[in-house]
Image (cartoon, helix red, strand yellow):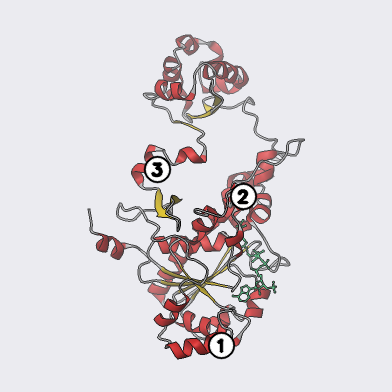
Amino acid sequence: MRSEEERTMSRPFEGVSVVEIAGWTFVPAAGAILADLGADVVKVEPPTGDPQRLLRNLLNQDDSGPNPFLEIPNHGKRSVTLDLTTPAGREVLLRLVADADVFLTSYLPALRARLGIDVDDLRAVNPRLVYVRGSGWGSRGPMVNTGGYDSAAAWCSSGTLHKLTGAGDDEPVAQPAAFYDLQGSNTIAGAVAMALYRRERTGETAVVDVSLLNTGMWALGADIAAAPFSGEVPRADRRAPGNPIANYYRTKDGRWINLVCLQADRFWDELCLVLDRPELVADPRFLDAAARFTHNRACVEVLDGIFAERTLDEWRETLAGFSGVWAPALTPAEVHDHVQVRENGYLSELTAEDGTPFRVVAPPYQFDGEPARARSRAPELGADTAEVLRGLGLDAATVDDYRAQGAFG
Ligand SMILES: CC(C)(COP(=O)(O)OP(=O)(O)OC[C@H]1O[C@@H](n2cnc3c(N)ncnc32)[C@H](O)[C@@H]1OP(=O)(O)O)[C@@H](O)C(=O)NCCC(=O)NCCSC(=O)C(=O)O
């Protein structure tokens, strides 16, 4: 086991300095990934704070304890407040950016122009800056200044919601909180690594654009590519012709199990024996994958009956030695206790201000066998303003002067 110091040295973004002017989840969560992987991330917030700070009650939580919706995108950073509508605030920002490697923003072009934080404004003080813009709808076209949240720009506009809900009488499926924001943040983090790698090799820096629309489309890419050929596909019916052992079955206690035996002929006989239904092996309707495809409805109904006989815990025991792949549909709360989550360090432990321990998900990559760990909880609004300014070499008198000019709001 390596020492804490050696581990710190090996984090891939160690020594990389990031300035973030971004709100909500999508772009800030990219900053959190970079911080977990070693970067120094300074979050520049308006004096009123990132609006995400006010979002707590989705969980019906009161105002105490950790705020997971703030922590996921903001842990591990330092916070500085700057009023960028004042010349003094902008001047401090330019000092910050002059030393940075990467700039992350979720602000749209009109606002970036108004606040003077566009590519050219910042490149004027730092030509090597990697400039990353997150948007709802892309960096070109009539919607460049249209606001976008992940439900509208990614979940709905990528076809995902329609794919899950269909066009009938069903109500929309509830979208997991910030689902595509978090996918997109991961994309941004990867793009930052690519941009820095290019800069390192060639000296050329980059402007990186990542949109929520493209992020959602990438995730739904197989369906989107197939759509011109398959036409309007109704919501998946698990009884329609298909492979019955790549399907979902409900247990006696109302839980769902996913069987995913894609090479069906390899697993069918074994499954019948594990399920204690040897007579199914010789059933002429189910003899091979082709027969089961045709008789999928009958086969699903037989398996529905079998899975309904036992609880999930009983199925865990029964299927323990089965060589095909299967998994229960876990609740998000159960994910905390998954043995692989624990063993692989996929959750980072933090402590809220009131002492409550809580966990945030680690970025989905590990280097040299070490999980990336969150280093600190999300900063209080502006908590690090003085420290960051000292780091820029500003003396107390200069800081007071900036304060008097309204730089910090
Ligand atoms: C999210 C947005 C729709 C939010 O747009 P807006 O409502 O216009 O809010 P903004 O944050 O852009 O700006 C609000 C106001 O704050 C002011 N403002 C902001 N920062 C500063 C600073 N530092 N100093 C002074 N003033 C500031 C700004 O001038 C505006 O003033 P006034 O004009 O005077 O009010 C858009 O930023 C967007 O589409 N971004 C790209 C995609 C994205 O990141 N979407 C969120 C995904 S997260 C998500 O979906 C989720 O978490 O859920």
Residue 51 lies in what quarter of the image?
A: bottom right
Q: Which of marks 2 and 3 is nearer the N terminus?
A: 2
Separation of residues labelled 2 and 1 (CA atoms): 38 Å
Direction from residue 300 to residue 378 in the image, left or right? left
Where residue 391 sits in the image (x, y, percent)?
40, 80
Separation of residues labelled 2 and 3 (CA atoms): 25 Å
Where residue 318 sits in the image (x, y, percent)?
41, 20
Asked if the residue under mark 3 is in contact with the one under mark 1, i.e. CB atoms within 8 Å, the reply is: no
- Closer to the camera in the image, 324 or 306: 306
Kindly tell me whether residue 207 is visible in this rendering: no
Instruction: Say what secondary structure mark 3 lies in.
Output: helix
Instruction: Say what secondary structure mark 2 lies in.
Output: helix
Separation of residues labelled 1 and 3 (CA atoms): 50 Å
Return the residue at label 3: 341
- Closer to the camera in the image, 405 or 313: 405
Looking at numbered disc 1 in the image, what kind of residue is underneath it?
A: Ala
Nearest to viewer (mark 2 / mark 1): 1
- Is 121 situated above or below 109? below
Q: Which residue is drawn at 40% across and 86% down?
A: 393
How many residues crowd around disc 1 within 10 Å: few (fewer than 14), some, or many (20 or more)? few
**Quadrant of ligand 1 in image:** bottom right
Q: Which residue is drawn at 59% across and 84% down?
A: 406
Looking at numbered disc 2 in the image, what kind of residue is underneath it?
A: Leu
Instruction: Say what secondary structure mark 1 lies in.
Output: helix
Return the residue at label 2: 58
Q: Which of marks 2 and 1 is nearer the N terminus?
A: 2
Return the residue at label 1: 404
Residue at the top extreme, as displayed: 279
